[in-house]
Image (tube, rainbow, N blue to C red):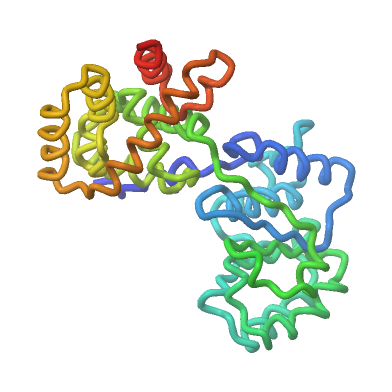
Amino acid sequence: MDQYVVSARKYRPATFDMVVGQKAITNTLKNAIRTNHLAQAFLFCGPRGVGKTTCARILAKTINCENITDNIEACDKCESCLSFNRSHSFNVHELDAASNNSVEGIRTLVDQVRIPPQVGNYKVYIIDEVHMLSQQAFNAFLKTLEEPPAYAKFILATTEKHKIIPTILSRCQIFDFARITVDDIAKQLAWVAEKESVDADPMALHIISQKADGALRDALSIFDQINSFTGNRISYQDVIENLNILDHDYYFRVMDLILEENPQDILLLADEILQKGFEGADFITGFGTHIRNLLVSKDEATIFLIEGSKELQERYRAQAVK
């Protein structure tokens, strides 16, 4: 029996071009490699699941590649690339600051920095969740970060930039990763579904994308969860039931009943929603969003602001006309 690998790991980007939703950052990094203008230290910050650690690994792999392609991608054939792919590279060191936040952990890292690389051009140190380092650990790290050997590169990643002391920030080239848009996540999920031979409803993928709140990793985890439940077929109904989401259909029905001036059926529908375990406040918030979407869909120039499939946008447009 083959070992199961979750989609977030199985389809983790291996090149800059495969990174979703961070075009400006990947282009900047590729140009820095092309022109040999690499900073000594990088700080990748942004919400969870948007590609910070992934980009750090791709950057580490690419700058050590012996035969970088014209498109500034690693060749995947040289000794450095092969050892990186097998997780045996002695040039790339990953440290989790959440569990190694003491001065001793940083001093060990500083001692390692003194040893030049045996294969490749650079030794790359990726420190994840760097905001978890203690004040003393930050201070022990300052001098090395300011004047590292020419072969050493530091890539710091964090979800909470405001917790990092200014003296560290001033020594880094800072990249702010954005939340990934619903459309970009939905396109990636559709691609994964095709690779996995999963029959997925586009509207279902849009709902998963909205639930993920800009984090592709979260979206892939939800995708795996629902796929396990349904067995290679993901429908819109399966998604709203599994994620306990109020269906758009309720809001359309309530608005139609308001237009028909039918308060009795509105009360019955509200009771049905409450009986399903949804909070009244959640319904009010969702209905407020529904009214906003109706206003947005009145103008052709703004309808794209509705985060949803083309079918859903058309449905909003039809009700807005009423």
Q: Position of residue 1 (x, y in %)?
A: 24, 46
242 with respect to 152 (left or right): left
Q: Is residue 285 left or right of residue 108?
A: left
Looking at the image, which residue is at 38% across and 37% down?
A: 288
Residue 47 as seen in the image, left or right of residue 147: left
Q: Position of residue 54 (x, y in %)?
A: 58, 50
Q: Position of residue 297 (x, y in %)?
A: 47, 19
Query: Which residue is found at the position 70% from the left and 80% from the top?
Result: 138
**Of residues 92 and 38, the one drawn nearer to the viewer in this rendering:** 38
Q: Residue at coordinates 27% horizontally, 18% vertically from top-left?
A: 259
Front residue of this view, candidates 159 and 244: 244
In this view, 127 is above or below 314: below
Residue 233, visible in the rendered structure: no
Viewer-nearest residue: 278 or 111: 278
Q: Quadrant of the C terminus?
A: top left
User: In front here: 138 or 191?
Assistant: 138
Residue 40: quadrant of the picture: bottom right
Percent across and percent down for residue 307 are 46, 29
Q: How many numbered marks does the figure carry?
A: 0
Residue 276, picture quadrant: top left
Q: Is residue 200 above or below residue 216?
A: above
